[in-house]
Amino acid sequence: MSTQPQQVKAGAYYLGATLLDSLVPFITLPLFTRVLLPEDFGALALAQVYALIVGGLANFGMAAAYNRNYFEYCEDKKKTGELFFTTIGFVGMVSAVLLLLTFIFQHGLAKLFLRTYDRSELLLWALAANIFINLRLFFLTYLRNMERPKQYVMNTLCLTVLNLALSLYFVMIVKAGVAGILCGQVLASALILLGLLMQFLRELPAGWNTKLLKEELGIGAPTVPMAVFSVVSNHFDKYLLGLLATLDGVGVYSIGQKIANLNFTFTTSLQNVFSPQVYKKMFSGTEESKKEIGIYLIPFAYIVCFVALLVILFADEILRVMAAPSFASAADIVIILTLFYTVLFFAKINGDQLIYAKKTHLTTALVMGAALLNVLVNIPFIQKWGAQGAAWATLLARSIAGVVIFIVAQRFYRIGWQVKPMSLIFGSLFFLAVALLVLREQSVAYGAILIYKMLAVGFYLYMSRTVGVDFKMILTGLLKK
């Protein structure tokens, strides 16, 4: 197991990869929102919802199964190679079949998801992009578990630059419209995936192992419905907006969600650091390790909430810089959805707990319940309050579901969570965010709100001493050569 400074250093690399991965949409957003209409972004968002659903089916739960089984066979290079190539081979074949079916039935699917036949090509491009991203994640999982963050970051850098160049070319020069964004993603991801495949064929012994595949299917197959319902739970709000409101509303909501998603992306980058360490502590099998996990996760929770606070406090300023004036109403959506994405920090840990315990069938049932609750809450909220109602409904429904999943995960693998510091970290974030929403609702002068924002940042930084977060250690780890 790597030392704490090494983990901090790795965290810096993964954070760099995350920032690079998030760079493309935020470099291009000021340009695209001035060339494309809100309804274009609405159609793009709905096509991506379709791609996430079908891509989840194509993945067949193998991502979680591979991540778990890697640690079981990592000492045997032959089995490590067979596990990897069997996994991506199976997912690749399933993906090809689903892409073909989408091509055959694209017009009917476009009418169902986009409410028009004219944009059916968006479904094909969106699904192809999602498939390549899913396949690439297996390569990145291997690099992460091998604790090779530099290679992880370099791969992300290459993809970011290529994606940026191709997206700008198709949208701004070829004038391909919103489809140009997806074309750039597909071509960039395909080229990077080809390069990774050539590298791994040299590094790992290629092979097919049906026994390992059956073992992975036993873990992953029960999560397939979970993947579908997870998309429903996370993205059905946009689909309902498209049905109950307008594509323009979906577009504004989508831009707000894209900015709010910054914090989820950041959390995922940190997960590349803490998830392998949490698994290693779980597999150590001691009671002491359960308490160690709870203590170990405190700095990660604090940093995740601090980044969320910055996004929440400066949502207006971010939108002024990054989007056209027609998207200004997305600020409240950014604030509300950032709180939602922050709560998902616990979901990432709970998922590891249930996968470790081989209780993936329970995960599926829980996520299905969360998806149903999300739909039921979203319908009346969207009808009454539109896009902002969708954001509140998503936060409310997923928070309730999150509490249930947390309780179930603790039953099968009890982590010794540190209740007081965790309550202070997340409680402070929610209080400061709600206070900001109240100030905005009361139309308080911008100068007064700006003072509040500065005080909120200062308070949160000072609170680090109370929860035991050592910034000196973090900075030392980042700077250590």
Image (spheres, rainbow, N blue to C red):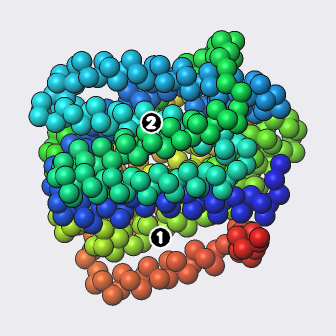
Instruction: Give residue 397's position: percent from left, percent from top.
Output: 41, 41
> Pointers 1 and 2 in contact (CB under 8 A)?
no
Residue for badge 2: 132
Q: Please report the residue visible at 38 percent of the width from the left and 83 percent of the height from the top.
A: 450
Query: 228 or 382: which is nearer to us?
Result: 228
Res 310 label: 1
Label 1 neighbour load within 10 Å: few <14, some 14-19, many 20+: some
Instruction: Give residue 119's position: percent from left, percent from top.
Output: 16, 36
- Quarter placement of the C terminus: bottom right
Instruction: Give residue 383's position: percent from left, percent from top.
Output: 19, 43
Question: Quick one: SS at disc 2?
Answer: helix
Q: Please report the residue visible at 21 percent of the width from the left and 67 percent of the height from the top.
A: 324
Eye-nearest disc, 1 or 2: 2
Query: 410 or 163: which is nearer to us?
Result: 163
Q: Is residue 334 visible?
A: no
Give the amino acid at mark 2: Phe
Q: Please report the residue visible at 73 percent of the width from the left and 49 percent of the height from the top.
A: 147
Task: Examine the image and state in which quarter residue 128 appears.
Answer: top left
- Spatial distance from mark 1 to mark 2, Cα to Cα? 32 Å
